[in-house]
Amino acid sequence: MVRQVVARTVGILPSAPENEQVNGRPSSTHPIVDAETIRQLPAHSTYAVPAGSLITPLAREAALERSIQLTTDNSEIRNPITDHQSPITDNRTIALGADHGGYQLKEQLKGMLARAGFTVMDCGAHSSEAVDYPDYAYAVAQLVANGRAWRGIMIDGAGIGSCMAANKVPGVRAAMCYDQATAVNSREHNDANVLTLGAGLIGPALANQIVTTWLNTDFGGGRHARRVDKIDAIGNRFSRNP
């Protein structure tokens, strides 16, 4: 069941015998390297990933935590965020903000995103001195709404208040995520363009996993597009000039 969920998330079907069909469609033969596979390996080792394998975000995180190098054809596997390609090929800009409670996590994520090749627009705060989260959530949301940023990430203590504030900006669909499942759902079903995180609820490792998953999950479209259009229509009824 876990492998089926992972396969659906990354857009393939679980591996099955050749020519077998799953849900009426030809199955994929790509094996999945999951976190359990990595945890069974010795720490500080090198694992040769079988050709064509798909590596889950949790497996990559487990490899990082256990200092296991993932290789294929004698080449190191790249970071999943680095591998991501924005739908707008010339726009890899992330608006990033936080209040005093999220400042340290913001700084960590800023470095990770920059190393992955994203342009980070740091909206503040720039220290752990007490500030008001709506100001920074609004700044992040505005950059996304006016197209200057492709996606936005905002961090406060719980992630809830910033989500409320960001969703007041027309064109923004902010989602507060606390695990990989909510990150996938917010993108696949809701086409969220702003992610809010609660620094007091999650640690740095989980935050990295959530951001990685969120940036790499595509919108599902189809029936979800009709529903997202209705969400946007509600906001448009009450929109005013910012």
Image: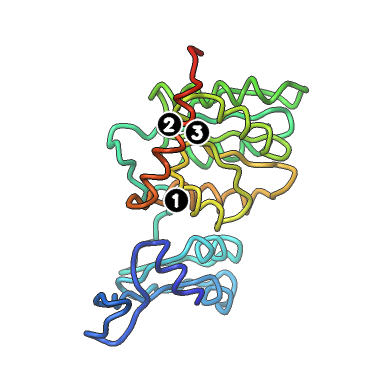
**Relative to residue 199, is residue 185 drawn left or right?**
left
CA neighbours of label 2 inside 10 A, class few (<14), some (14 to 19), many (20+): some
The residue at which mark 3 appears reads as: 152
Residue 189, labelled with which disc? Answer: 1
Q: Nearer the viewer, residue 210 or 72?
A: 210
Query: Which mark is nearer the camera, 1 or 3?
Result: 1
Position in image of residue 32 (x %, y %): 41, 73
**Which numbered disc, 1 or 3, marks the residue that appears first in the sequence?**
3
The secondary element bearing badge 2 is classed as helix
What percent of the width, then of the height, locates residue 80? Answer: 42, 54
Q: Is residue 6 above or below residue 129?
A: below
Q: CA distance from mark 2 to mark 3?
A: 21 Å
Residue 86, horizontal then vertical, whole percent: 34, 41
Residue type at the position of mark 1: His
Nearest to viewer (mark 1 / mark 2): 2
Instruction: Residue at the far right: name it.
Output: 130
